[in-house]
Amino acid sequence: MDLTRKGRVALVIMAKAPEAGRAKTRLTPPLSASEAAELSRCFLLDTIERVREVRDIAPVIAHDPPESAPLFAALAPEFALRAQQGPDLGARMAECVAAGLAAGAPAVVLIGTDAPHVPAEHIRRAVRLLGEGAHDVAIGPSEDGGYYLIGLRRPQRELFESMAWSTAGVFEETIARCRSLQLRVALLPPCYDVDTAEALARLEAELARSGGKAAPRTWQFLAGRQPRLRN
């Protein structure tokens, strides 16, 4: 991983190219494939903006597929880019952590794009806690049993191997593995991923009440779509 700001915590967005038929497929329906791709693009843009709010980090996009690099370079020219490598999600996450640490980052924080509304303060807290060195792992639990963020100061492939991803036990299993490895864990406030119609309706309702401040690109898409989702 080519980090242009060595010595700073690497903040890595794990991103999939927003292509119809590949992006946010669990939201089709209620969305069409093209709408799901556009929503995915909005999630990505809001996540990029959230990362831009965090100071003194080395921003990275780990992208999939490898040939999508020009797309991400255009959206976030100041971010370092790295193609995701590995046969499954766990292997790709572990590889990103190892690569960032090997490139000189004191810690690596991974976030996805399924929670574009996550407060920047949650991310800042993870960066700060790991940067201070008092914790080995920072993790932000999702309400569906997974997590929206994980950060590490050392490679810990055991946290990613043979994990039943996209199931309700991911967070608890990760915490159990941290305990078995005697890792010092910092827990962040919970949030929720938006990968079901119910979660999308919840996000739309929350954004409507706040004027879309938490995720403006996403709100612009949702507010202009008819028929509106219902929570």
Image (spheres, rainbow, N blue to C red):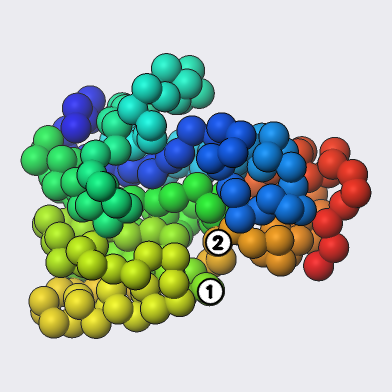
User: Mark 2 and 1 residues: CB-CB less than 8 Å, in contact?
Assistant: yes
Q: Residue at x 49, y 51 (%)?
A: 120
Front residue of this view, candidates 17 and 6: 17
Front residue of this view, candidates 230 and 29: 29
Dot 2, how many residues are within 10 Å of its Cα: few (below 14), some (14-19), or many (20+)?
A: many
Quarter in which the C terminus is drawn: bottom right
**Is residue 43 visible from the viewing direction of this image?**
yes
Q: Which residue is mark 1?
A: 143
- For this view, does 213 lie left or right of residue 57? right
- Give the numbered dot on residue 98: none
Q: Position of residue 227 (x, y in %)?
A: 90, 49
- The amino acid pointed to by label 2 is Asp
Q: Secondary structure at mark 2?
A: loop
- The amino acid pointed to by label 1 is Glu
- Give the numbered dot on residue 193: 2
Task: Using the numbered discs, state the Cα–Cα distance from disc 2 to disc 1 in whole angstroms.
Answer: 7 Å
**Is residue 217 visible from the viewing direction of this image?**
no
Q: Position of residue 58 (x, y in %)?
A: 29, 36
Q: Secondary structure at mark 1?
A: loop
Q: Position of residue 113 (x, y in %)?
A: 50, 47
Q: Quadrant of residue 63?
A: top left
